[in-house]
Image (cartoon, coloured by chain):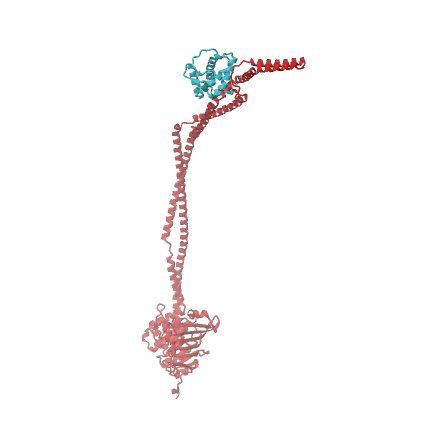
Chain colours: A cyan, B red
Amino acid sequence: MIIDVVRVSEKAKHQLLTLKRRTGILQWNVLCRWALLASLAERTIPPHEEIVTDSNVEMSWKTFAGTLDDAITAVVRQRAHEDKVAEDQLPQFFKIHLHRGIAYLLNGAQDLRGLIAMASGSEKS
Amino acid sequence: MLFQEFVLHNFGIYKGRHTVDLTTSPGRPIVLFGALNGSGKTTFLDGLQLVLYGKHARCTGRGNMAYPDFLRSTINRYVPPQEGAGLELEFIHHHEGKWQTIRVIRTWNGRHETTRERLEVYCDGILDAVLSERWGEFVEDFIPSQISELFFFDGEKIEALAEEQSAAAIIRTGIHALLGLDVVDRLAADIKIIQRRRRVDELSREAQALVRAKHDAMVALSDQADALAANIEQQHAQVEERMRALQAIEEEYRQQGGGLAEQANTIEAQLKAAAEQKANHDIYLRDKLAAGHLPLLLVEDLLSKARTQLTAEINAQLATAMLSEIRERDAQILSMLAQSEVSETVRRAVADQLERDRQARVTATQTPAYLHMRAEALAPYAASQFDDLRTDTHEALQREQLLAERVNDLERTKAALPDPELLAPLRQRLEEQRRQYEQALGAVALLNQQHEDCVQARERADRERQSLLLELADQDLKDKTNKRVLRHAGLVEQSLHRYRDAVLQRNVKRLADLILESFQSVTRKPKMFERIEISPVDYRLSLFDHSGNQVPSHQLSAGERQLLAVSILWGLSRASGRSLPAIIDTPLGRLDGQHRNKLVKNYFPKASHQVILLSTDQEIDEDLYGKIKRVTSQEYLIEYSEEKQSSEIHEGYFTFDEAYT
């Protein structure tokens, strides 16, 4: 487990609400999973940023990762290793990837189909 | 015609069978019967008439008696009635150039309550069924019953004939029958009947009125049919107009999307189904795919590297765990080799090899570890699994697109649907137009039906009129025929009248002359009358003396009247020209000697070619008998026998013994 509780900023919350509306996906955890993985897929390193996770959206790691716990842990650590991020920087690393991912989704997915297309690499809508 | 034989059987006073030969020889025409009063002279005469004429015979003593009763009364009273009686007469008759022998046998008996007679007629000895059956008609050919009186007469009653009335009657009968005027009269009567019948068949005014009525009805129906036809024409135009209007509004309705509007419900349902399908698919995408492993595809390469790293980390752990063990074993192996006689070269080679192996393991232990995961943690994320997931997702997206397009299409179609409210007025107009069109069609159908009915009624009326006309034409023809027949009948009637008058005029004159001639030949006063006239109208006999004065018949004496009567009969029989036997009963009744002489001399031998005289001994007495004897063929004496309770007919005449003595 990389962090105990997953939290997002107020801004990210609003972005997630927009995504909820666009995709029909109502679970915060599913959208956050998508966001984190979308950011990790992007080879650039997210710029350092102080993010205040002050919104009321929060979930335990277990809720966040669900059945994908091992896979998510593996890819976060793999990417952290590649980006030479120290173990104690992982929560920060996680947070900035999560928030960058949310922003990515907001730009890349106008609806559920767009979201899915992002993952499958097939036709973009 | 000549009588040959006469048979009486139990007839009246004649008991048993009595056969009399009546044949005469030429020049001797008389058959003389002598009989005292009550011997059966008159019965004999009645028998002759009865055998010939049956119930039409004018027998004495029948009066108003019914024929069967009369027959019964004629049966001889001394024989049982069931034995019956009979009469037979045989005569010869000239028929179609040949002599025929006819025998008439009339028998009857009183066995039953009603006496029935039986008649048999033999022709030349053979029973003739037709002649027997219809003798009543045939006998008229032999001796017409109407004139039988002229030939069968009773001298005792003959005097009455001289009376004006009776004379007129007998002359009338004689003239009519003898001259065939009865035929003329019958013809005139028939014409009257024809005229009456024809007049009944007059053209019926009612029928003509009926024809007129039929004709009027036909004309009226014709007019009605024409009016209806015109109406139909008009109505057809209206129907076409309505049809055009309907087509126009239908076109408009179609253009306004009326057709689609009617599909709205279908499209709605399809859209609903498609949207539902799409929603279900979206749920699949959202809850199964998006919420599942799908996002891992984003980081497939990271995950792949992690899997390699994890294997390396696990290997390092193993190597670290095994390295000291391996060092010890390697040292043991090398020390063993040193103590053995293995060459230095081999020992060094093994030592190097072991050194290199250990070195590799050392290198492995030096692999950095950052995943810190269980060895099998990433096993479910093999590359093949991602390929499958990618394929599935691709298909799901394609399906999603199809569904989305379908929903989209249907939504567009639905959007294109016209507003039902907008169409409502148009639709109302359409329906109204359609209703009107159908009404017009119905009206035409009704009119057509009426027209057809009308035409049929007219044809029926026409047919009826035609048949009436034919009937009338028929009647008309009949009418014309009737008129013609009536006209001709009138002409014929007139001709008959003229003919009758002419014939009468002529014959009445001739008859009058014959009567005068007869009278003069038997009277002792031939100059008594100058001439005799018979009125052709009422057949009255008028006698005129030489001074031209008319002598009333009642001024004549009884004897003279008898002579006149005989003359009348003789004249008539001469005028008739028929050769029939004459039968004279009591011929000389009240006559004086001179007259008797004259009759015997001039009348009896000439009265006919066969003369049957039924006389008493006081009439044809010894003197006269001597005079008549020359011309008699047969002589008979009828005598009543107390013994036999019957009259007997014997040959021979009275014997005048006393006179001779």
Please identify the quadrant where the N terminus of chain B is shown: bottom left
- Front residue of B26/B535: it is B26
B260 shown above or below B379: below
Visible residue check, residue A60: yes
- Front residue of A47/B129: it is A47
| Quadrant assignment, res B335 | top right
| Quadrant assignment, res B552 | bottom left
- Front residue of B519/B267: it is B267
Visible residue check, residue B518: no
Q: Residue B511 location in percent, x, y?
A: 39, 71
Please identify the quadrant where the C terminus of chain B is shown: bottom left
Q: Residue B379 location in percent, x, y?
A: 53, 21
B502 shown above or below B451: below
Q: Residue furthest front?
A: B339
- Front residue of B322/B435: it is B322
Q: Residue B308 location in percent, x, y?
A: 55, 17
Q: Residue B193 location in percent, x, y?
A: 38, 61
Count of marks overlaid on the render: 0
Q: Residue furthest bottom?
A: B661
B205 shown above or below B522: above
B654 shown above or below B298: below
